Image: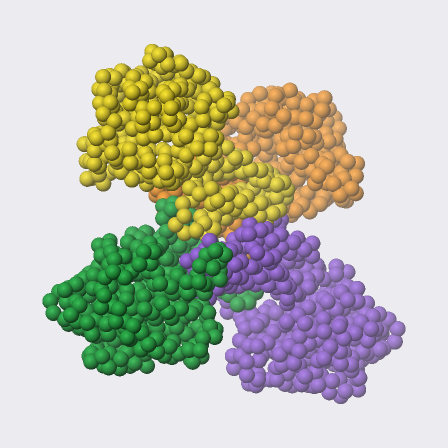
Chain colours: A yellow, B orange, C purple, D green
Amino acid sequence: MKTFSFLDTIDRQLDWQRDLYRHFHQFPELSLQEHRTAERIEAELGGLGLESLRIGGTGVVTVLENGPGPTVLARADIDALPVTEDTGLDYASTVDGVMHACGHDMHLVALLGAIRLLSEHREAWSGTYIALFQPAEENAAGAQAMLDDGLTSRVPRPDVALAQHVMPAEAGTIGTAPGPVLSAGDSLKITVHGRGAHGSMPHTAVDPVVLAASIVLRLQTIVSRETEPGQFAVVTVGASNAGTKSNIIPDRAELLLNLRTYDPALRAQVIASIERIVRGECAAAGAPREPEFEYYDQFPLTSNDVGAHRTVTKAFTDHFAPGQVFEAVPATASEDFSRIPDAFGIPYAYWFVGSVAPETFRAAVEAGTVSSAIPANHSPFFAPALDPTLEIATRAHVVAACAYLRP
Amino acid sequence: MKTFSFLDTIDRQLDWQRDLYRHFHQFPELSLQEHRTAERIEAELGGLGLESLRIGGTGVVTVLENGPGPTVLARADIDALPVTEDTGLDYASTVDGVMHACGHDMHLVALLGAIRLLSEHREAWSGTYIALFQPAEENAAGAQAMLDDGLTSRVPRPDVALAQHVMPAEAGTIGTAPGPVLSAGDSLKITVHGRGAHGSMPHTAVDPVVLAASIVLRLQTIVSRETEPGQFAVVTVGASNAGTKSNIIPDRAELLLNLRTYDPALRAQVIASIERIVRGECAAAGAPREPEFEYYDQFPLTSNDVGAHRTVTKAFTDHFAPGQVFEAVPATASEDFSRIPDAFGIPYAYWFVGSVAPETFRAAVEAGTVSSAIPANHSPFFAPALDPTLEIATRAHVVAACAYLRP
Amino acid sequence: MKTFSFLDTIDRQLDWQRDLYRHFHQFPELSLQEHRTAERIEAELGGLGLESLRIGGTGVVTVLENGPGPTVLARADIDALPVTEDTGLDYASTVDGVMHACGHDMHLVALLGAIRLLSEHREAWSGTYIALFQPAEENAAGAQAMLDDGLTSRVPRPDVALAQHVMPAEAGTIGTAPGPVLSAGDSLKITVHGRGAHGSMPHTAVDPVVLAASIVLRLQTIVSRETEPGQFAVVTVGASNAGTKSNIIPDRAELLLNLRTYDPALRAQVIASIERIVRGECAAAGAPREPEFEYYDQFPLTSNDVGAHRTVTKAFTDHFAPGQVFEAVPATASEDFSRIPDAFGIPYAYWFVGSVAPETFRAAVEAGTVSSAIPANHSPFFAPALDPTLEIATRAHVVAACAYLRP
Amino acid sequence: MKTFSFLDTIDRQLDWQRDLYRHFHQFPELSLQEHRTAERIEAELGGLGLESLRIGGTGVVTVLENGPGPTVLARADIDALPVTEDTGLDYASTVDGVMHACGHDMHLVALLGAIRLLSEHREAWSGTYIALFQPAEENAAGAQAMLDDGLTSRVPRPDVALAQHVMPAEAGTIGTAPGPVLSAGDSLKITVHGRGAHGSMPHTAVDPVVLAASIVLRLQTIVSRETEPGQFAVVTVGASNAGTKSNIIPDRAELLLNLRTYDPALRAQVIASIERIVRGECAAAGAPREPEFEYYDQFPLTSNDVGAHRTVTKAFTDHFAPGQVFEAVPATASEDFSRIPDAFGIPYAYWFVGSVAPETFRAAVEAGTVSSAIPANHSPFFAPALDPTLEIATRAHVVAACAYLRP
């Protein structure tokens, strides 16, 4: 570890962080219900002598002003998932059917740790550090809630935004990449209308079951024929539902689609294709009413600024040991973090933090069972290795921020 | 009315029948729950000095032995439907959500009337008359329940079986036809298996939504290509359901099919085609498990014996006035009556009884609104004209039986 | 044979008819090329002292005026097929690749025989008899050609029109039916437009191969879902062609459809459905140009007038022996005869004449091989039994005409 | 130009090369018919005092042995295309319908030039240089023909193989990339069998038109659902043909597919999916015979060895000026070159040579019309800028070889 030697004082606070992590892991709260979580964050900030703002209901922000220099915004998400924990950990969730199965507890405690380090070592940096605890990432509602509650006018405008996420890679490593790192995700409910009838009288009906089937098959042609070969695009019909009885032709069918793209122009093209296909199929069927399109759970693209990526990655490789920083491949998951820098009109860097105990990970690599044997995010068995994940994630936040806040 | 002059005594009992009809209409009971209905039938039979048997839970049978001669079985169904009556009749259903919307109350009271006439005029016929009140026609369970409870060994073997059904034709008329008069109806639940995955990872899934869509489209080719043009066959997919979330590819899809045919060989052909198509599509999809086929609500074909049809129709045209007996066209509805004669291995005749007030019917014919303006069976507005429907239906049972039981 | 005893003089002319039949069978001519056939017909009519008209190129008409009374038009078609005869008959076709494989030679010689009988027995009837020899039935062009050439203004307006066709039933029998006896037949060429591209660049194309496939599958739903179950309708895509190379996405696809219906309203419905589906699918595909629809080989419905059917059938049953006249079932083949009575706005009767040697037919019935073992029309083995087919077909024309032309 | 100064002597031989280029361009020959081309190559080699071998009919190989050191094989393809030239060049093709529209004339003359330079400057290198002129690249037959004719046992085993291709980039530039640079391409003819019938009798048929349509739609799911999102895979049905008449249901359908992949495992997966889908659909259709699969025009993957790429690219950047060497993106076209190094089991490097006059190219870049305005390979307007393309391509061959053959 070559740079930012003040970070070695992290040893003094790691037990505090570990206790906090175990606490948050035991008391997870669902999206938009993170009341106790937010209160505890506020209490800890208060314990550090820091004031905080409530923004967006259960969002918490604290601003460390420390002389001239750039302004950096660091964000952690804080909500948990409707998953029943099955890890067997002694600090497993105590809340039935709710679990920090996506590691947001790790994110928030790492950010608390970074705040403490920066707060206690003001000589080591100069500028302004905004730490933001965001609710409701899982349903894509939290970043927007904070923006709707006036975030951009209630904190100084940052120059850059930073965020990180634990992933099933070897604990102790950090993955970065320029450009797209998480896909844009859109959900879409399509309702098509037919005309119901008794099952023995199809000629009096417009059969929405057949219509929906045609649509599902036709939608396949978007990826197979309309997007450029090799370009990333996913059009999944996750649900197709029509009718309840064998002998009643229903009067409508409902499709739930999920789209994933890395390119905004391609995303727009895919959406246009979906609507064109559905309208065309309804016309072919002689549908008595126009189809309805309802978009929901829309996650923006997470695409790292090339400059911010370079700055942060350089700081990581300077600080960490050889082999600790790797080039990440884009993940097909989605995030709402980018709404915040996009609202400010600023660049951002988003990176991954490995969370699997090294011996476990290496054994899985050798056995070729990384994807099958290691519980991924959202699994009831998801259990980050507290050490060294928590320390590395804390250091990463400080190192990335100080890449900008050097005195 | 030229024949069976003893039938003119029906005038003396019609008020009793009308009261019974209003009673049963007010107290409908669902399939297999016809307890009070069965008890009242037993009570009325007792009042006529007749003993009765309980067969199949809520089925009631009485046997009138009256000297040498053939044995005739006459059947009436007695169950009601889960429909909320909206007729506004002063004798409308008093049971919430249950209604005699298919006219079984008319059937059973006509049979009670026929029993009384035959019982009180034993000089007019010779042989054995078995009157059978069958539960649970609506879900195709009642005839089988009576057979499972030993019907064929508990009553004398009949030579012919008779049954009738009210329909939206002019009250006062009777429709008969040789051969198929009601279709065979089969319901079929098909479960196809894929492999679930996150919506962003289709390559790890076998998508059952796409598989089900392919099956639905392919099933259309049975009627369009595989059955003989002009032959009656219906293959309806009344329900197609898979998945609940946009971003989760489910692991199975469920289809509910309803089939209608008039020809047993064609029915077998259609069923074989369905299974062939579904298995082929599952193979094309690389489905990890075989599909499952579960048949239910299976109604047999109702196909009048040509001889029984001729005998009964001749008796009707001899007894009723010109124009009262018409040639019916086959209906696409289904019945379970034929299971009973089929179990005995005997011929049967099944006919329709018009139930719409003549002035109403004729006005609808003139306006071309018969199918749209006249409430059909299963409608909450279904309301047979008590007169003359009840009298004609009662006479029909006696006339048809006496065609065989002439002294 | 009870009526029209003058017909017994047919014995005196049968050898003349047999020779003519063998002649025409040996020298068949394709549609619109029936020059020698027409000339020979004219010559024979001249030999009978009759004048004739040429209408529609190779169509021949003669008019027998014989006092007051109704006017009857009798039509025979005269063209042959591009089939290579394989019957081994000693009077087989001498023209390579052309054969009277549909029996039009029988039709025309029977009509010549009827003309001679009526011409020589003018005492037996009163009115006007128009005998019409029509070219080009096989490609649906001949009736229209005669109409286009002024038929309706060049002959007296008939009161009824008559025509017959040999079929693979027992020779000596005649089949009649009211209403539809031959289906309407329509051919339709559909061209759909995509945008071509190299096979490795589907994203720059609009793929017409996929579009055509969607259309073909969707067209199945017309018969399976949109026509009434049991109603006769056929929608066949006989040809679907697109592309010539594996690695070039073509810019269009071509579908050839054939439709069969018995009901004009249903025919119109099916055509509307086809166009709706094709347009909808092109819209779904984002096709750069509208599809094109080109109708060809359109055969009208042949549907006997109920009154004409009754009159003619009564005359047949009065004249022929019991069992010789049977009720025909509608055939799925098509004819252009009805264009002529439709142009005049008059009723018509069309019947079938059995042409299989009785012993052969009865053996096939017993063996259950009627459809497999007896060569049908258009087969290279099609060979009507000259006797008694020719006599019965001749008598049928006279009997049917005299049903109207009784003195 | 910093390295290999002996290459400056190229000026002395460029006119000879230009004349040769114009000659070959004027006299193009189709695949496997390159007789005059091969003879002229042999003559030129003879003029340089070199012996040559005929391998694979019209393939020519010469081996320059020059002391100890590695062995390098350099390959040029020599066949032309069935394209009618429309360039208007004064040295345009004199052969009707045949044209060097893919630049193989450039490849072969550059290789002749390289041979002459190496032959005349033996002091500048040490080792063995094998120059191979391959026929029939366009139909993927030539490399295999040379291997079948014993290539691997008739020349020394090389240590590395080299090849290049002109492309529509700025003349004077060279593009290289590690790993896949050209896709694997496979063509596949699929024949599916139905049972023919008259169009009015679909129930006696197994309709191959409907079967082919189902297959086409189902094949779309390979790319849309079965390959990993973002992975390059193309499954194009370039031709789908069945039937010739509207009213005849044909007995078979034929599909021509083209596949493109960069990954051998993915290619195998796609082929397995195609066969699975086609077999499953045939089973669903009740096809009377198994489908047939016939693979043809199969091009292997061209994927540069990482080490060879690095060695060659380093030599290029050392020799050429800044900006002349760029990183190429993989092209979706295909080549059969790699069969040769694969048969030897040796690494290879394959690069692209720009061939568009710089001013033309830069104007097109500015106008955003590179893909639309510049004639690409296989176009009748394809016309490489002779200068400096020929010189650069010649130098490239020498530089790449000498990266291995340094003394």
Residue nearer the viewer, D216 or A404 = A404
Residue lying at 70% horizontally and 40% vertically, measured from the top left: B371
Report the residue that reaches farthest toward the right: C68
Residue name at image x 57 percent, y 86 percent: C94
Horizontal side, residue B113 vs residue D391: left or right: right
Q: Is residue C200 above or below residue C224?
A: below
Residue A27 position, x and y percent, is 35, 17
Which quadrant of the structure image shows residue A52? top left
Q: In the displayed structure, would residue D155 be above or below residue C12? A: above
Is C266 drawn above or below residue C242 in the view shown?
above
* Residue drawn at x 40%, y 68% as measured from the top left: D384
Q: How many marks?
A: 0
Residue drawn at the location 23% of the way across and 65% of the way down: D5
Q: In the rendering, at what x and y percent does residue A22 appear?
A: 29, 18
Decide which of A290, B384 is in the foreground and name it: A290
Which of the 4 image quarters holds residue D193?
bottom left
Viewer-closest of D186 and B261: D186
B223 lies left or right of D313: right
Residue A121 visible, this angle: yes
Q: Quadrant of the C terminus of chain C?
A: bottom right
How far from the left and from the top, in percent, is residue A388? 23, 26
Q: Where residue B350 sits: x, y (%)? A: 62, 41
